Image (cartoon, rainbow, N blue to C red):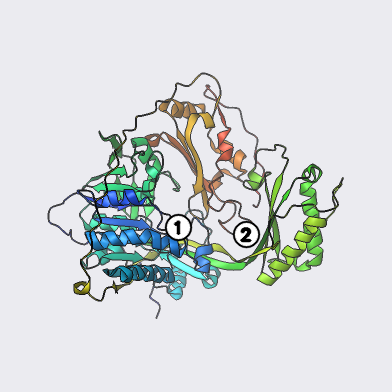
Amino acid sequence: MPRPPVVLTIPRFLPEKIMPDFQPFKIFTPNGILGYGYNEHEFWSVIDDAQPPAAIIVDAGSTDPGPYLLGSGKTLCSRESYLRDLTPILEACATRNIKFLVSSAGGAGTNDQVDFTTDIIAEIATAHQWHFRIAAIKFEEHRDTILQSLRAGHIQSCSSAPPLREVDVKNACGVVAQMGPEPFMKALADPSVDIIVAARSYDPAPFIAFCMHRGVQEATAWHVGKIIECGALCAVPKGRSIVATMYEDCFDLTPTESSQRCTPVSVAAHTLYEKSRPDQLPGPGGVLHLDACTYEALPDGRTVRVRGSRFSTSEHYEIKLEGVEHIGYRTVYVGGIRDPILIGNIDAFLVSVKAFTTEAFPHMKEPGGPQITFHLYGKNAVMGAWETESHEVHEIGVLAEVTAATQHTADAVASYSRTMLLHGSYEGQLATGGNIAFPLTPLETSIGPVFKFTLYHLMKVSDPLTFFPANILEVGAAAVADTPPPVRRPVMPLKQLKVVKDVVAAPLLPGPISIQDLAKVVRSKNAGPFEITLDILFASRQAFERAKQADVLTTSTIRKLYKLQSADDIVVLMFFEPALAWKCTFKRPWPQGSIGERDTFGAQLHAPLLSIMVQDSDTVGPLPSPPLSESP
């Protein structure tokens, strides 16, 4: 029977501290995503330190790769990559009594991917005669309960997702929900559990849970989780592995690579990354407030101490639903054009290719019929309608993307359009042997199913544990008594730590200067599947103040650069002084990772910001009204 969507103000699951008097401890995150690899020498240096970590905690999933992982069930990394990353971690657990927590197993965090991960752990444990008790936490999906909650008004859009419809819930081929820290804390309450493998989770959830289980204050636990779930991305230069030393009301961050360091600005800046805004970070059960935080550089020159975060509990507890719909199949082909005559006529020529293909497949004109998208690398493949540059090019790469209701139709349309592209005519044509260079055979490649995000919504729940049951698995050696004593790994010598000195930015000269020359970081990224976020981290306070006073990083500037329909498309636009940074988040004109996607991760959409000129004066000239945004 489906559970009724009862919504109450709930008591949080807050277990007692595991020790009466708080003792500082360490958390080790070897990389931001399980399967992405890490330096094994650094790993064992941390594990064999005089003060080893109490836990190794790693996130394993994200919506960044788009809807495909959730729709197809494929894992983010290969089995071989998981075996490589897990083997040293499990050795550390078996021989040093270190807990291991992994969230969003497999990439999308489906129940099957939880099983996939626990199977690999069991395989490794058996091979090495280790014994582990695993708490496997899954999502117990009740589609009828989701529909009841929707009808009762207990589901709302997350970020800029469109309102949820019943048809979206019914047609979804894959649905997960992000658990908060509570299911992890419940599993940690059993001291015999060695490893926790969880389905889709709020990224900081396992860090929050372990910290609160050990007595760390709630806001501090949330803040450290928000940072180190990305590994050492907060370091300079950015890295993979990081150690957090936890105190009751603050924490220290130290990257493991001796050539890297954390700085107050680099740590403060990390809350900009992938977030709609950096000062208020909502999550399941509340909001983390960072406006009063302090970031202190410690004497070693590599470690930063963070304190002052606040956490406010929300009236209702909400879990984030993620779901995708299967919308067809995709076939692609790739080639290159070098003929300058064709390059000069490329737009008109591609219109004719589509027209001839539509004549052969008339149902392309119908709603939901086959579609062809040409991505022209060297012209506007990344930015599409947002492209601001129009330089002449001598070569164009063509990626043709064909989608249709069946793979057979997608293959057929791709084959026909590829023939038209190769042998079609255009104005001024001299080359009659072929229009495009194909580097690969077979000429077309069947990619498989295509999906789109349809659920990215918050659902109120009466109990944060309800949908996330845990099963205890015993893997490896038959029993602890039967496990041979582990052979302790030789202690590896620590690298000589390097003291990295500050690089003092040169004073700015008078006159106009570009953002590219004012900033040390200019980046773009998804903030969920329905938003793009832009960050500028300035190289100095002088650069920050000049950009702020010039009043050029404005709503009108962003509307012009990204051809946004209205100011309402901009979710956040602000300067963030703790990181000497500027942040803008706006709505994606199209859902991430679906048909016609040009930048699944949103990683290259920062480019128009680089050439913005910052004046010495307090004003900038008016900008023209932007045209309407276009499809990708």
Q: Nearer the viewer, residue 628 or 520?
A: 520
Element under disc 1:
loop
Left or right, residue 211 beside residue 508: left
Q: In the orientation shown, which residue stands out farthest toward the left? A: 20
The disc placed on residue 250 is none
Three-letter amino acid code at the position of disc 1: Ser
Residue 247: x and y, percent?
A: 21, 47
Dots 2, 1 in contact, CB < 8 A: no
Name the residue tied to disc 1: 62
Quick check: 623 above or below 477? Answer: above
Q: Nearer the viewer, residue 424 or 317?
A: 424
Examine the rendering and report whether any part of residue 316 can be seen.
no
The disc placed on residue 595 is 2
Quick check: 92 above or below 228? Answer: below
Q: Residue at x 26, y 73 (%)?
A: 477
Q: CA distance from mark 2 to mark 1?
A: 20 Å
Question: On the image, which quarter does residue 544 sit in?
Answer: top left
Left or right, residue 197 beside residue 615: left
Q: Residue at x 18, y 60 (%)?
A: 16
Examine the rendering and report whether any part of residue 95 can be seen.
yes
Q: Nearer the viewer, residue 94 or 420?
A: 94
Residue 387: x and y, percent?
A: 65, 42
Three-letter amino acid code at the position of disc 2: Ile
Q: Earlier in the sequence, mark 2 or mark 1?
A: 1
Q: In the orientation shown, which residue stands out farthest toward the bottom? A: 1
How crowded pointer 2 is (Cα within 10 Å; few <14, some 14-19, many 20+) is rated as many
Element under disc 2:
loop
Residue 588: x and y, percent?
A: 56, 51
